């Protein structure tokens, strides 16, 4: 059953040094506020899992909290590079970053296997690609019925999955709608689940395409309006594309990045249970 | 195949607009390549520009599919990311990401995959992972695969759009992220890839298409006022040139107006509602 708790307490209880953590949300509903709380608490040596690391992981990587990254596309969408990610991979700053790299189809299926509690998933993928030479979590399996050789990808079972959703009710049931990405799979694959939400409502009204996660698969719900910014929550906010563009020069420069984190995340105690300044 | 001297082939279209950039030439020709498509799996950046321009010009009914899970998106402005809200709000259907890749893409439901690339070789294989920067230097890191390997494998065919330079069109890829035609004809079939693979690479200088017998990319068209020699100089391998090199039609005023309107509407700014 999910307790409705402060973000500070929920992160402190559920996210630990050395954990494998998935903070999912495919462009939409990215749990930025929870990531910033991780930075404030200095939770470190993390293995981070996300299809698209996005600016959220650029920040965690640059803050020196990440040992390993499991991912499939590491860019700033429509803008360019994730400079903190690149600096860590290319120069080991602020620490070396181990990579486990996949295609989107492979990552999505790794979560499906994780949620299904199967050891691996199969897909018709990675054919002719050099990707399998750089990871030990892709292999092949022969179909017992047709003899076709298929890609096998190891299941992903994070210690903790963190997601952002639009609404919860008082019992801690959660609903999200719009682009729902791989959040259901990432949540059901994990040992522990933290959900930040825009608001708590008396009753969850059914939404077209909406996904409901019942309270009994969630450990904690924290109310963080705007907690996805600069990503967004359909029905509540729109993607702050200008922020994603403004991030490029900040992240390009180590000093500018550290200053930004200091001023906007670490010193921002006022916002430890709320959104970043908009 | 023999080289065709520059400036001796093709026809000169004089009814088109005369004031346009090389990027606009590339984008307009990329959109035209979608004239016959029913469904298109759209990569972000240049492919998204082309696919949205196709909807505004040659193919209003084109079904745009984005990997974020949207089917039938009808944005009025160019999205910055593959997950901008308007893509979902205007879609016929929004599906979870595992469903998108498994049922729709792997299920063989999508005609055309439209991809960009950091590096491409003569067989239209793609590198978007790492580049070798020379001895004693760390590999240069690129974003990685995203959806491309399975898009290129499972869509009916693949179109590519990227700017033409020796940096992008290389003799040898530093890493094969996404297979185009592998090492030549038969490789896709041998690997059990359902789709036909890349059928055209549209650049700011012209259009390359794989030779049916060798699978090697051949220069088949140049844009107006572009010489074959210029394309050769911008290609990192010894480029094969078609016996007859055509010249693409210049953008029409309608195409240019539609392209510029999409871009003007897509100028990012902080959105509020």
Image (cartoon, rainbow, N blue to C red):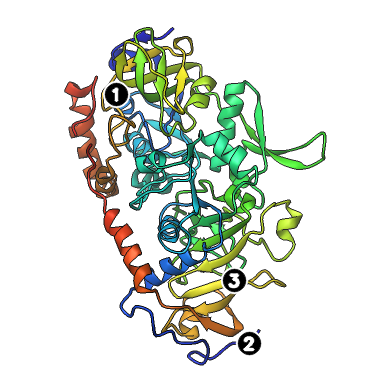
Please say if B163 is above or below A164: below
Please say if A240 is above or below B110: above
Dot 2 lies on which element?
A: loop
Mark 1 or 3: the one toward you: 3
Which dot marks residue A20?
none
The residue under label 3 is: B209
In front of the other: B33 or A88? B33
> Which chain letter goes with mark 3?
B
Question: Picture coordinates of residue A89 (x, y %)?
Answer: 43, 45
How packed is label 1: few (under 14 Cα within 10 Å), some, or many (20 or more)? Answer: many
Which dot marks residue A37?
1
Dot 3 lies on which element?
A: strand
Total residue callouts: 3
Question: Picture coordinates of residue B137 (x, y %)?
Answer: 44, 57
Q: Are marks 1 and 2 in contact (CB under 8 Å)?
A: no
Please say if A266 is above or below B34: above
Please say if B270 is above or below B208: above
Question: Picture coordinates of residue A150 (x, y %)?
Answer: 72, 41
Residue found at x 20% / y 23%: A271
Residue found at x 38% / y 68%: B255
Callouts 1 and 2 on one subunit: no
Residue found at x 49% / y 20%: A159
Q: Quadrant of the N terminus of chain B?
A: bottom right
Is residue A117 visible to the viewer in this orientation of the structure? Answer: yes
Residue occupying the far front of the picture? B61
Indicate the quadrant where residue A30 lies.
top left
Question: Picture coordinates of residue A100 (x, y %)?
Answer: 53, 38
Which dot marks residue B2?
2
Callouts 1 and 3 on one subunit: no
Q: Are marks 2 and 3 in contact (CB under 8 Å)?
A: no
> Which chain letter goes with mark 1?
A
Q: Earlier in the sequence, mark 2 or mark 3?
A: 2
């Amino acid at each position: 059953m999910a307790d409705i708790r402060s973000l500070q307490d929920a992160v402190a209880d559920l996210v630990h040094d050395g954990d494998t953590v998935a903070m999912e949300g495919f462009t939409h509903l990215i749990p930025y506020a929870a990531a910033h709380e991780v930075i404030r608490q200095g939770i470190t040596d993390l293995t981070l899992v996300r299809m698209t690391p996005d600016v959220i992981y650029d920040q965690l990587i640059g803050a020196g909290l990440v040992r390993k990254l499991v991912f499939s596309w590491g860019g700033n969408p429509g803008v360019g590079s994730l400079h903190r990610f690149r600096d860590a991979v290319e120069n080991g700053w602020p620490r070396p970053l181990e990579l486990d790299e996949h295609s989107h189809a492979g990552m999505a299926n790794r979560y499906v296997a994780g949620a299904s509690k199967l050891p691996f998933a199969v897909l018709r993928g990675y054919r002719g690609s050099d990707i399998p030479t750089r990871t030990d979590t892709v292999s092949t399996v022969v179909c017992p019925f047709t003899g076709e050789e298929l890609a096998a990808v190891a299941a992903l079972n994070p210690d903790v999955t963190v997601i952002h959703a639009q609404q919860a009710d008082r019992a801690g049931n959660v609903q999200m709608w719009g682009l729902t990405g791989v959040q259901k799979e990432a949540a059901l694959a994990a040992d522990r689940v933290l959900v930040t939400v825009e608001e708590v409502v008396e009753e969850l009204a059914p939404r077209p395409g909406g996904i409901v996660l019942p309270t009994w698969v969630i450990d904690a719900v924290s109310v963080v309006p705007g907690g996805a910014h600069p990503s967004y929550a359909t029905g509540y906010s729109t993607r702050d594309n200008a922020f994603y563009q403004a991030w490029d020069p900040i992240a390009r420069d180590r000093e500018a990045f550290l200053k930004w984190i200091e001023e906007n995340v670490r010193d921002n105690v006022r916002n430890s249970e709320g959104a970043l300044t908009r | 195949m023999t080289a065709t001297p520059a400036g001796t082939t093709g026809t000169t279209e004089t009814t088109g607009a005369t004031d346009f950039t090389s990027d606009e030439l590339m984008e307009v020709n990329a959109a035209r390549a979608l004239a016959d498509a029913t469904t298109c799996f759209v990569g972000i950046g240049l492919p998204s520009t082309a696919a949205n321009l196709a909807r505004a010009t040659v193919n209003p009914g084109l079904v745009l599919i984005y990997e974020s899970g949207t089917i039938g998106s009808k944005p009025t402005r160019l999205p910055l990311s593959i997950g901008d809200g308007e893509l979902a709000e205007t879609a016929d259907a929004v599906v979870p990401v595992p469903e998108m890749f498994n049922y729709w893409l792997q299920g063989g439901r999508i005609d055309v995959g439209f991809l960009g690339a950091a590096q491409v070789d003569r067989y239209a294989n793609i590198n978007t992972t790492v580049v070798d920067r020379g001895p004693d230097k760390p590999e240069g890191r690129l974003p990685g695969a995203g959806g491309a390997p399975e898009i290129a494998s499972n869509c009916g065919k693949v179109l590519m759009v990227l700017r033409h330079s020796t940096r992008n069109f290389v003799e040898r890829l530093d890493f094969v992220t996404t297979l185009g035609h592998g090492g030549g004809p038969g490789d896709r079939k041998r690997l059990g890839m359902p789709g036909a693979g890349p059928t055209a690479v549209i650049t700011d200088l012209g259009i390359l298409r794989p030779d049916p017998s060798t699978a090697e990319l051949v220069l088949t068209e140049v844009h107006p006022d572009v010489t074959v020699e210029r394309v050769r100089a911008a290609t990192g391998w010894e480029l094969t040139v078609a016996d007859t090199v055509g010249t693409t039609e210049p953008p029409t005023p309608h195409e240019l107006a539609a392209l510029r309107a999409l871009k003007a509407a897509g100028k990012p700014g902080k959105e509020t509602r």
